[in-house]
């Protein structure tokens, strides 16, 4: 089922529309990732790989010229113990000049709708929030309907040294 597009227009702010990412967005997505603090961004090959992957979805908020000003990625897969699907918000970013205008919230609204019973029907939707703006981010995600759960996040860092 296709997601319902979210369009937001207010008198005092430029409008944007949420749509699926396309191959032609590769450069914009790379720039958004750099803004998120990943200096290497991404490359066109990886963007094409992710866009065509059946268990990953990327939505962008596009400005009036259809240029992405924000993006969110959602990955999902079946999980044994849930006897159903689990989904993770992997990346969320809005370009600096567009922040505090409701773009981030609209992107989160899109993934929540996509994860819901009328679409993917996931049993759990989660995310890991990193960064030095922890409390601010927590408030943002809480305002989007998420609740903090105690969790130990660990990584096998050897693979990052070898393949990272
Ligand atoms: C987090 C982020 C995506 C929010 O996007 P945004 O478009 O600015 O968010 P919105 O405008 O939809 O804000 C929604 C609410 O969050 C809160 N909020 C967002 N940014 C805030 C800030 N800098 N300070 C305080 N509150 C903030 C506001 O309460 C706002 O509610 P309001 O609309 O009633 O004022 C954006 O700040 C960003 O890209 N940050 C850098 C990347 C990042 O940290 N990503 C998350 C990684 S886990």
Image: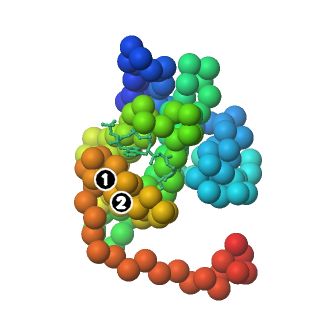
Query: Where's the C terminus, which quadrant?
Result: bottom right
Q: Is residue 133 above or below residue 144?
A: below
Q: Which residue is mark 1?
A: 139
Q: Residue furthest top?
A: 11
Q: Badges 2 and 1: C-beta atoms under 8 Å apart?
A: yes
Crowd band around label 2 with a 10 angstrom C-alpha radius: few (<14), some (14–19), many (20+): few
When asked about the image quadrant of residue 38, the answer is bottom right
* Real-space Cα separation, disc 2 to disc 1, in angstroms: 6 Å
Label 2: which secondary element: helix
Does mark 1 have its CB less than 8 Å from ligand 1?
yes
**Residue 133, image x, y percentages:** 44, 58
Residue drawn where x is 54% and y is 29% of the image: 62
1, 132: nearer the viewer: 132
132, 161: nearer the viewer: 132
Residue drawn where x is 68% and y is 47% of the image: 30
**Residue 75 is at least partly visible in this image:** no
Q: Which residue is mark 2?
A: 135
């Amino acid at each position: 089922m296709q997601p319902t597009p979210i369009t937001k227009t207010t008198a005092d702010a430029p409008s944007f529309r949420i749509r699926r990412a396309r191959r032609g967005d590769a450069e914009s997505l790379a720039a958004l990732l750099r803004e998120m603090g990943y200096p290497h961004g991404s490359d066109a090959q990886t963007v094409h790989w992710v866009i065509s992957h059946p268990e990953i979805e990327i939505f962008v908020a596009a400005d009036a010229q259809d240029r992405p000003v924000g993006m969110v990625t959602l990955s999902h897969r079946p999980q044994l113990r849930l006897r159903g699907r689990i989904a993770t918000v992997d990346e969320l970013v809005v370009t600096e000049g567009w922040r505090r205008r409701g773009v981030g919230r609209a992107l989160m609204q899109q993934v929540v709708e996509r994860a819901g019973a009328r679409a993917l029907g996931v049993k759990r939707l989660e995310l890991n929030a990193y960064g030095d703006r922890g409390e601010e981010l927590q408030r943002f995600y809480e305002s989007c309907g998420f609740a903090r759960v105690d969790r130990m996040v660990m990584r096998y860092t050897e693979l990052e040294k070898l393949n990272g």
